[in-house]
């Protein structure tokens, strides 16, 4: 069995875990953080709240353009289409930027 020399082990890099790990390190503790995912941030950031909100935002924009909500303000669009791969790409970009921010804080 391998031996490790840490003052504190944080289990999980979700919103509580990564903050605890960063603070422990700031206080001078030799800190390890164990996370089962390849990315930091927990469920909310990776597959829950943030990706869902990104998809909802894109779908709301599509709704406004496709069904005339914008026309009340003089904005008229025709033949509006939803590019689902592009929408999913924007969601992935949002998640990547936010998880990257947490990775940066861990350095």
Image (cartoon, rainbow, N blue to C red):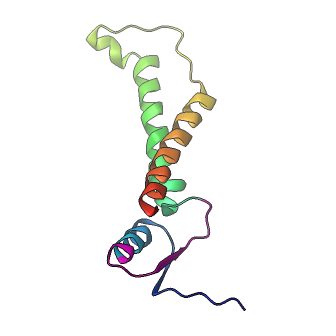
Q: Nearer the viewer, residue 48 or 7?
A: 7
Quick check: is 106 in the magenta stretch? no
In the rendered structure, the answer to whether residue 35 lies left or right of residue 72 reads: right
Outermost right residue: 1
Query: At 34% across and 9% down in the image, what residue appears?
Result: 75
Q: Which of the two residues, 34 or 83, is positioned nearer the viewer here?
A: 34
Residue 95 placed where, x, y %?
50, 47
Q: Quadrant of the N terminus?
A: bottom right
Q: Say which residue appears at 54% left-offset and 9% top-offset.
A: 79
- Residue 21: x %, y % from top left: 42, 73
Where on the picture, by quarter, is residue 34? bottom right
What is the magenta range? 24-38
Residue under the point 43% across and 72% down: 17
Could you tell whether 64 is left or right of 80 in the image?
left
* In the image: residue 100, left or right of residue 24: right
* Location of residue 83 in the rendering, given as x and y in whole percent from the top left corner: 59, 24
User: Residue 101: percent from the left, percent from the top?
Assistant: 43, 51
């Amino acid at each position: 069995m391998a031996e490790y020399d840490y003052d504190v082990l944080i289990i999980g890099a979700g919103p509580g875990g990564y903050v605890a790990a960063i603070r422990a390190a700031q206080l001078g503790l030799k800190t390890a953080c164990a996370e089962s995912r390849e990315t930091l941030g927990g469920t909310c950031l990776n597959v829950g709240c943030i990706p869902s909100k990104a998809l909802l935002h894109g779908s709301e924009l599509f709704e406004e353009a496709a069904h005339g909500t914008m026309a009340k303000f003089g904005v008229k669009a025709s033949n509006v289409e939803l590019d689902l791969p592009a929408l999913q790409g924007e969601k992935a970009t949002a998640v990547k930027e936010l998880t990257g921010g947490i990775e940066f804080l861990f350095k």
